[in-house]
């Protein structure tokens, strides 16, 4: 069994920003901040447009896998 690397980042793309148009941009990639309590409630903690991490409904995002070069660029930008 493969154990997930703790340093591996998770990214999602916004597919719904209803109620949060200033905080979330549709079709934009966001970095997920691990939060087991949020996940238990089906929420995600993401770094939003404010540059801070906030909770949003998990259904507002779709998980994506990004190539290593894209991940490096995304992490450098944040």
Image (tube, rainbow, N blue to C red):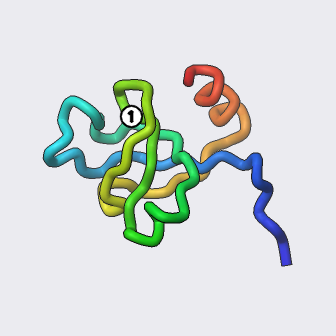
**Which residue of the protein is positioned furthest toward the front in this rendering?**
37
At a point 57% along the width and 53% down the height, the residue shown is 34
**Is disc 1 placed on a helix, strand or loop?**
loop
At a point 36% along the width and 25% down the height, the residue shown is 50
Which quarter shows the C terminus?
top right
Tell me where residue 74 sits by quadrant. Answer: top right
Position of residue 33 in the picture relative to residue 73 (left or right)? left
Residue 7, position as x, y percentages in the image: 76, 47
Query: Taking 27 as reference, is 6 above or below it?
Result: below
Q: Residues within 10 Å of mark 1 (few under 14, many from 20)?
A: many
At a point 65% along the width and 46% down the height, the residue shown is 9
The residue that disc 1 covers is: 48
Position of residue 61 in the picture relative to residue 77 (left or right)? left
Which quarter shows the N terminus?
bottom right
Position of residue 65 in the picture relative to residue 20 (left or right)? right
Residue 40, position as x, y percentages in the image: 45, 71
Tell me where residue 41 sits by quadrant. Answer: bottom left
Residue 65, position as x, y percentages in the image: 60, 51
The residue closer to the viewer here, 50 or 27, is 50
Residue 66, position as x, y percentages in the image: 61, 44
**Which residue of the protein is positioned furthest toward the bottom in this rendering?**
1
At a point 45% along the width and 43% down the height, the residue shown is 46
Position of residue 16 in the picture relative to residue 53 (left or right)? left
Query: Taking 58 as reference, is 56 above or below it?
Result: above
Query: Taking 30 as reference, is 3 above or below it?
Result: below
């Amino acid at each position: 069994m493969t154990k997930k690397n703790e340093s591996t980042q998770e990214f999602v793309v916004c597919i719904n920003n209803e109620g949060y148009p200033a905080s979330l941009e549709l079709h934009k990639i966001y970095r997920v901040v691990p939060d087991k309590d949020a996940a238990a409630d089906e929420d995600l903690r993401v770094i939003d447009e404010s540059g801070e991490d906030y909770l949003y409904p998990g259904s507002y995002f779709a998980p994506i896998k990004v190539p290593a070069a894209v991940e490096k660029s995304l992490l450098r930008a944040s």
